[in-house]
Image (spheres, rainbow, N blue to C red):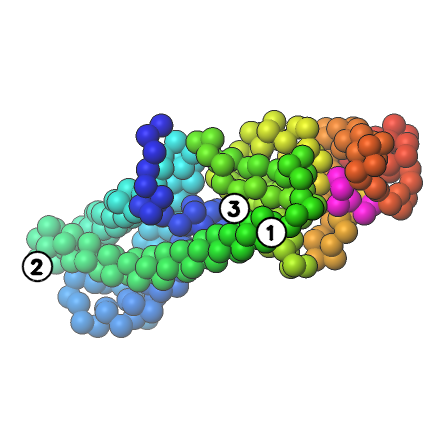
Amino acid sequence: MAKIDKSREIPKFLLDKQYLLGSVLFILTFSFLFMAIYTPFSYTVWFSLTDMRHLGLTAVFYAGALLIMLVSKRLMYRVQDRVRFTFAKYVSWLLAEVVAISLFYTLFTSVFIAPFEQPSWVILLKAVWCVLMIMAIPYIIQTLYAAYKAKTEELQMLQYEMSLGSEQTVTYPSLINLYDYNGTLKLTINADSLYYMESQDNYVKIFYSNHGKLLSYMLRCRTKAIEENLAETSMVRCHRSYMVNVMKINNIRKKGKARYVVLDNSDIKPIPVSKSYFKNLIGKIDRFNASGRGVVEQEEAAAVATPQAAEPAE
């Protein structure tokens, strides 16, 4: 795959599932305010919150526009592992959304609304302008916020790596290297600072501590690749969506048929342990306990000392 200038790529948070869904909700909310101001000044807009017929048509149109955006965001989320989104590609994708919604508005108007004096192409052009204004402001705000989040995260990681380099006691075997999709080394982290990783499909969110503060870093890589790369480290997969550092495990708790890993940081919620990864987790714990590199406090000892005694549930 050809390398792309990092400065041309969009902030990684823009392709996060929560951000994509949030953008849809933000646009819908903003559109109500925009149309309330714009409608009285336009003769091609038929939206109404007072006339019952037009109110129903408005609701149907909004449902259609919402469907178009949701399909677009789902496709964007699905193809991000095959397409490196530069700003040009991202803007082109959003413009395609604008055109699709505008075409839908023009078609909807021609079918369900009394004919306007203006031809369809005029309605389409006005619709493109209107939809562009509605979507541009939320997208600009969201992009700026995502860029701020990404830069803040990178700055925190840079500060951490600088402090790591100044620690004379850190030796190579205790350092964990993490690579992105292209096999590029993105960060090096001390195993003593690493707590857990959470899979988010095309990204892995890495949680680590620096000067007593829990921080996170989003790495564009699949969990399976990281699991294979860290097979000889203290990291182990305990769930489809989670990997934990066995050196940070305080205890394993059982609640009903489910089990949870409790890490030695009160800011981290208990992490679920699934049936298919339970034996693997116990094996890694035993291995690091035997080597003196990890200690598990066995609160509810049956959960760890005798893993075969009870069949864990997903």
Q: Secondary structure at mark 1?
A: loop
Residue 304: give x, y in percent of width and height.
86, 36
**Looking at the figure, which quarter contains the N terminus?**
top left
Image mark for residue 166: 1
Disc 1 to disc 2: CB gap under 8 Å: no
Query: Which is nearer the eye, 109 or 289?
Result: 289
Task: Name the amino acid type tagged 3.
Answer: Met
Q: Secondary structure at mark 3?
A: strand
Q: Is residue 113 left or right of residue 254?
A: left
Disc 1 to disc 3: CB gap under 8 Å: no
How many numbered marks does the figure carry?
3
Residue 248: give x, y in percent of width and height.
75, 45
Q: Which residue is mark 2?
A: 117
Instruction: Tell me the distance, in whole angstroms, between the alpha carbons under discs 1 and 2.
Output: 74 Å
For discs 1 and 3, the disc positioned in front in the rendered view:
1
Residue 280: give x, y in percent of width and height.
75, 28
Is residue 253 shown above or below 211? above
Q: Secondary structure at mark 2?
A: loop
Q: Residue at x 17, y 67 (%)?
A: 42
Q: Which residue is mark 3?
A: 218
- Which residues are drawn in magenta? 246-251
Q: Residue at x 63, y 31 (%)?
A: 230
Residue 95: give x, y in percent of width and height.
25, 48
